[in-house]
Image (cartoon, rainbow, N blue to C red):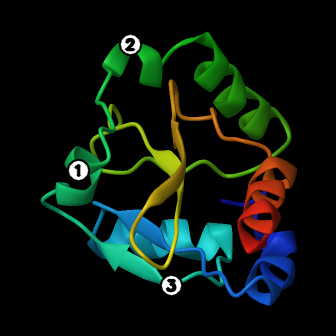
Amino acid sequence: MTQLRPYYDDIRALNTEVIVISFETGYWLQVWLAEMEAPFPLLLDPARKAYQAYGLERSLLRSWGPKNLWYYLKARLTGRQVHRTGADTSQLGGDFIVDASGIVRLAHRSQEPTDRPPAADLLAALKQLQG
């Protein structure tokens, strides 16, 4: 999500909105939102219906694999504060482009927490849909 923040005006210029869906609620959600400084609308899905509908998996092994552990170690070494949440850390996310008719035009289901498509790829897909 942080990679999309600098491109938010470009995304909006394409008549598109980024929506964040989270199963987290309460205090830790507020901490996360403050850290991300996200301008995006947020939908809460504590029952994870959207996660299920989009085929997003839970995997403790992939969530805490070497790549994600390295991400947190680098964050700590650079002085970035890393908050522990009470959330289910095994829930994996994803990135989707859904058109105005509800058709999924791009689906990226994360294989681990740091697995996200580059913002440039998402922008290119949005521009291609504009035709």
Q: Secondary structure at mark 3?
A: loop
Q: Do residues under tags 2 and 3 come within 8 Å of each other at their CB atoms?
A: no
Label 1 and label 2: CA atoms lie apart by: 22 Å
Q: Earlier in the sequence, mark 1 or mark 3?
A: 3
Front one among 36 and 94: 94
Front one among 74 and 110: 110
**Quarter occupied by the N terminus:** bottom right
Q: Is residue 22 left or right of residue 14?
A: left
Label 2 and label 3: CA atoms lie apart by: 30 Å
- What residue would you read off at disc 1? 53
Task: In the rendered view, tell whether residue 131 sits above or below residue 113.
Answer: below
Residue 127: where, in percent of width, then height? 81, 67
Give the foreground label among 2 and 3.
3
Residue appearing at x 71%, y 66% in the figure: 129
Q: Residues within 10 Å of mark 3 (few under 14, many from 20)?
A: few
Residue appearing at x 49%, y 70% in the figure: 31
Front one among 74 and 1: 1
- What residue would you read off at disc 2? 61
Q: Secondary structure at mark 1?
A: helix
**Outermost residue toward the left in this view:** 47
